[in-house]
Amino acid sequence: MHASISPLSTSNPPHSTLQPYSSSRLCGLRREAFGFHSPSQFRNRGIGVVSAKTHSWRRSVFSASNSASDNGTSAPASFDYDLVIIGAGVGGHGAALHAVEKGLKTAIIEGDVMGGTCVNRGCVPSKALLAVSGRMRELQDEHHLKALGLQVAAAGYDRQAVADHANNLASRIRGNLTNSLTALGVDILTGFGTIVGPQKVKYGKIGSSDNVVTAKDIIIATGSIPFVPRGIEVDGKTVITSDHALKLEFVPDWIAIVGSGYIGLEFSDVYTALGSEVTFIEAMDQLMPGFDPEIGKLAQRVLINPRRIDYHTGVFATKITPAKDGKPVIIELIDAKTKEPKDTLEVDAALIATGRAPFTTGLGLENINVETQRGFVPVDERMRVIDADGNLIPHLYCIGDANGKLMLAHTASAQGISVVEQLTGNDHVLNHLSIPAACFTHPEISMVGLTEPQAREKAENEGFEISIAKTSFKANTKALAENEGEGLAKLIYRPDNGEILGVHIFGMHAADLIHEASNAIALGTRVQDIKFAVHAHPTLSEVLDELYKSTKVNSHNTKPVSEPVTV
Amino acid sequence: MASLSFSSAVSSSTPFLRPSAFLLRPRSTRLPLVRAKIREIFMPALSSTMTEGKIVSWVKSEGDVLSKGEAVVVVESDKADMDVETFYDGILAAIVVNEGETAPVGAAIGILAETEGEIAEAKAKAAAQSSSAPAAPPPEVEKPAPVAPKAEAPAPVAAASPATPGKVVATPFAKKLAKQHKVDISELVGTGPFGRVTPEDVEKAAGITPAPKANVVVAAAPAALAASPPKAPASYPDIPGSKIVPFTTMQAAVSRNMLESLAVPTFRVGYPIATDALDALYKKVKSKGVTMTALLAKAAAMALVQHPVVNATCKDGKSFTYNSNVNIAVAVAMDDGLITPVLQDADKLDLYLLSKKWKELVEKARAKQLQPQEYNSGTFTLSNLGMFGVDRFDAILPPGQGAIMAVGASKPTVVADKEGFFTVKNQMLVNVTADHRIIYGADLAAFLQTFTKIVQNPESLTM
């Protein structure tokens, strides 16, 4: 016990209590997510002699906010909870942790496994597979190894052990996530949640009796499932979605990947590293349609062309039949524009990576007059749910993939935190343009803000100029030391005021590098200011330093940047 | 990655009048008559310091239609990779400098034809320019200026690819290799699943030795493939017709171990052993599933218990590491190498258990399912080539062990006893290689005496 007190006092220095939690909050959140102890946990257990002072201070804050929420509104004491969250994915988890931090009595309803898609069938296990593929690539790249002076015998792998690594990682993160909720006193209600009326949710396993809970506010965070277009028969063995692929039950010799977005690209990285050949099927005329075109072009040159990958663009897969009766998987392609039959492919497996569909059926939205749009729950910029007549529904919010604004795990969490801020009296609007995204191929791709065409369009419409700064990883000492000079970073900004509109990185550790730029956008930092910030040498972060330093902002113009977030 | 445009020179269609490759201006006299043109695509100077450039990739392939301003090729300069675009519309008739190769600034790297009719001519020009020119020159070489469109110019595009029944299915990598080695895939018979053309089929057609698959996974490095044919170790002359087969993982491990063994100072001691008693015992217990390997392993293990130094290891050149267990590794030949499954605690297990254990290990070894501790925990190795009639041989000491015993065939030998009487006895020669840092001649001799005693009085083995 005494040992556990020391991290407490360091992690919660007295000065942070003088601030309204804004600085310590996020750290606390992260610590929870990774299974460390946080001050609030100790508070619940009622221990901690050394820090009793800070705790009592905190407790008074919580009781104050509790009384505000219990007594200050129209219906006090009649609610079971201040906040009920439907769905325990990353979005629901982020919202719950923040809600507890803010003193709300919180419950989370989960009908499936804790952790949702990200932890169980998405980001987390895929990173485990990509960690393997990255190392396989390094070990197989004789040329690269030789350039470093290394000699390595032929690399091989054990499929089951690789699959186990992904699975173990998912269960470990799931455990951490569950523990962090229970340790904070969040009630986990098991079953599928359905909204039965305003501020009322029932939950329960199918077939068993339902329980009804009332809550002052409700957040829908039910996430999404893989989207499978019509005509495609998923058998889970030879025609699969990411859900199945992450289990890595077999490594086909030849796999077709339908869709060349993040999911498809990441899996192509995994499969080719494990020895498969890959055929991409993309409905757009270009591979990687979501990326900045210049980045996409370079990425194609590095991630597609030299690998055992070919592709069909501008085609739809109208029919995919799983392998059976001694026949391979058969894929019928039609031209995306003319709809004429174009080709038939015979492959060993097909992975459907055509995006994700919201998981909102059975939520009981009809009970409160909400009509989903293609399954998505309509919300305003504050994640408040809009009903069929266009009116806001009080006390009901929807975050994450279910609202479809930006289908990324960390977006869901950020939206959840934003909602909790609103519930506790701080108006908050999340700036989605400051949310980074990353694709964990080797090398990685990351981005924040607008792509170049989007920025040009916006510039034209709003009548301003844009400039572009670019740098190659070949100019970065650390990248060259790693012999990983392949890469490009570009910065799109306004030369009149220095506002950062978008940053795109393709290269080693791009996913980790993007945050300097996304934070700058979120905080409204301008390039003329950030260019004076110092970067350690030699680091990959100097790629961004290089970008900032090569910008040219018209010095005579001191127009302030448009306020990015605060309302 | 800025975009640059390349300059090209234009020649009239007079064949083989090679235009100066270093002219950066169109050379055609502006005749009113519309004449077909063949242009060369030059290696552009992307920076003031650039003297040569490497082709990173061709964005377009031979036969692709290009329009002005489109990126055609990506060139790596001393600073960055740049897309190079064309100033002219036309067809990319031929690629002179392939991906990964370098060319000096100003050299022709590709040929642009204005019409399809000129493709053949442009190809001829490309063949004349390309220094390596591996393929036979195009058939049109001898012909005068093209007037009529060539019948077979862009053949492969239109070549037979009927609907599903006769359709040629080729894997992505097979297609890539075919393009690289200029193999017409439609003429290949696929040997892969469902009759598909595999990368190996293409390599065979291109006359390249296919790289055998590594035990689980194919080594996918494309760079290695491109470089493999000329990459034989420089010090040995190339013998025509030889082929290079890279090591499998197991073979690579053997190679590594063998090289490592050179660092250990070893010596060898041989000993003849009469085996009549052992042979007699073997005959008795054979029906119970006991193998000669188990008998020898058991005998060696029992001798090792009495001579622990022979079961020891010298790890750092400064000390003895006495092993508490007697684990006998036994070399087993595999189809593509050698592995040494280990009979753990061979001194403690009885002969029957040992034989059973051995059978399991061999099955696992053949199925490549041995766990690491089942092949790398040996403290002493036994290698037996007797069944092949080898009468004596000399084993290399595996790293991490103190001694290895090489067992030859047992055969009738004339021996003289103390009284000078000749008899014929079955005798085998064993030869032990040991690490002289820890095991000295007398140690080995004593160990061999004990071993001989056990083999010649083998009843103790069954106890």
Image (spheres, rainbow, N blue to C red):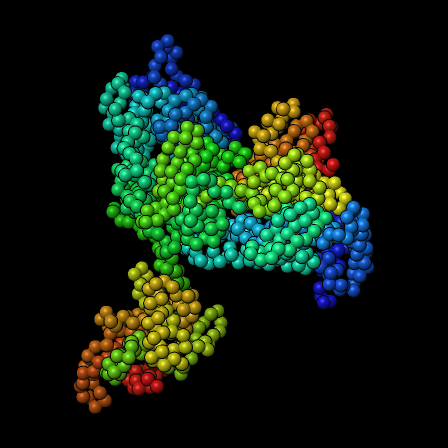
Q: Position of residue A544 (x, y in %)?
A: 61, 39
Asked if residue B230 can be seen in this view, the reply is no
* Quadrant in the picture for the C terminus of chain A: top right
Q: Position of residue B312 (x, y in %)?
A: 43, 75
Residue with the most extreme top position:
B32
Please report the residue visible at 35 percent of the width from the left and 49 percent of the height from the top: A324
Q: Position of residue A84 (x, y in %)?
A: 67, 50
Residue with the most extreme bottom position:
B419
Q: Position of residue B280 (x, y in %)?
A: 24, 83
Q: Identify the image quadrant of residue B371.
A: bottom left
- Number of on-image labels: 0
Q: Identify the image quadrant of residue A180.
A: bottom right
Between A380 and A263, the residue placed more toward the observer is: A380
Q: Locate residue A520 relative to residue B86 in the image: left or right.
A: right
Between A382 and B286, the residue placed more toward the observer is: A382
Between A149 and B419, the residue placed more toward the observer is: A149
